[in-house]
Image (cartoon, rainbow, N blue to C red):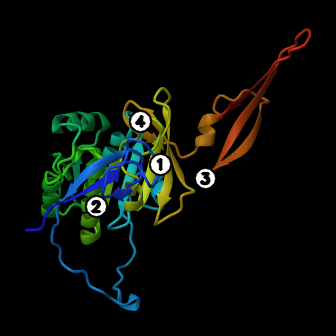
Amino acid sequence: MAKAAIHHVCRECGFRTAKWFGKCGGCGAFGSVEEEISRPAGRSASAVLPIDQVPLTPGRRERTGIGELDRALGGGLVPGAVVLLAGDPGIGKSTLLLSALDRLARPQPVLYVSGEESLQQIRLRGERLGTLSPGLHLLAETDAVVALEHARKLRPRVLAVDSIQTLALSALESAPGSVTQVREVGHRLASFAKDTDIPVILVGHVTKDGSIAGPRVLEHLVDTVLFFEGDRSHAYRVLRAHKNRFGSTNEIGVFEMKSEGLVEVPNPSALFLAERPRGAHSRVAVDAAVNYELSVHDMCVATIGIGARQSHAADA
């Protein structure tokens, strides 16, 4: 029987070394190197084919039914693609995901694996959002092997995992959410997507500085990285594509959070300029491939002596 190998891996950049060091030799971070125990597992050999003999399937995309999301994805979900949806806690990632899965479940079933919420909690959110399609299958599970077994049996149109930091492999001794678990679970899910041509959507957490929690190799592993941005104290959210192997990264989607969930904003300029005063000046700003019309205001107050102050504001 093959002996388990012990390595030390940096949780920031994925740098591997046989010995432990206080400072990572790859990115220079201190205290980021953790021990990893890997056990060898057998797998079948892959086929080698000339490039002109690789079989091609007609290109198609699975449209989610949410126009702003499809735009950020480059037109929809590509078969076998792995999409990472990241954002701050409470920004609306699970709400957007549940709404998209409800629309995708109309022709054939989809599978939503949740490691953070119970089935009852998801059902209550579905009641509020009106996302109760019979084809939307729910699974509350934190074991990645069990989740993949259910996915292989169901053969869903789309597999969604919320979140990847909560899934773990029992064969690994590290805790869920650690660099080892996130990397290995990510590899298992990506292999499932490529082998079955089933798109996989992963929800990811972010750190205090706004980067995706877990190893950097996770961002390299997936095909598309979407960031859901916005202030939780305001109603508007922006979905940006930071990486997209099957589309442009110059597309964004704009949403408004309402009581019934996230609502698309097809014309942000009209919304931002709804309260523009008569005679106010405006200009056009470009964000990604979307043009916005902004209302610019200048307020000047007469002062006596030195230290004059000016105030500038822009409505956007």
**Mark 4 burial class by Cα count in 10 Å: few <14, some 14-19, many 20+:** many
Gap between marks 3 and 4 measured at Cα: 21 Å
Label 3 sits on residue:
288
- Marks 3/1 in contact by CB < 8 Å: the verdict is no
User: Which element carries disc 2, helix, strand or loop?
Assistant: helix
Work out whether mark 3 precedes mark 2 in sequence or the reverse, and give the earlier one: 2
Q: Is residue 222 visible?
A: no
Give the mark toward the camera: 3 or 1: 1
| 3 or 4: tag closer to the N-terminus | 4
Can you tell which quarter of the image residue 314 is in?
top right
Q: Label 2 crowding class (10 Å Cα cut-off): few <14, some 14-19, many 20+?
A: some
The residue sitting at 44% across, 51% down in the picture is 226
Q: CA distance from mark 3 to mark 2?
A: 31 Å
- How many marks the image carries: the answer is 4
Q: Nearer the viewer, residue 5 or 224?
A: 5
Q: Which residue is mark 1?
A: 28
Do the residues under discs 3 and 2 have CB atoms within 8 angstroms? no
Confirm or deny contact between disc 2 and disc 1 (CB under 8 A). no
Question: Of 4 and 53, which appears nearest the observer?
Answer: 4
The local secondary structure at tag 4 comes to loop
Mark positioned earlier in the residue sequence (2 or 1): 1
Residue 154's image quarter? bottom left
Rendered-image quadrant of the C terminus = top right
> On the image, numbered disc 4 is attached to which residue?
91
Residue placed most toward the observer, 152 or 189: 189
Q: Answer with mark 1 or mark 4, whichever residue precedes in sequence.
A: 1
Q: Mark 2 or 1, which is nearer the eye?
A: 1
- Gap in Å between the C-alphas at discs 4 and 2? 27 Å
* Residue type, label 4: Ile
Q: Nearer the viewer, mark 4 or mark 2?
A: 2
| Three-letter amino acid code of the residue under disc 3 | Ala
Say which residue appears at 47% left-offset and 40% top-offset. 210
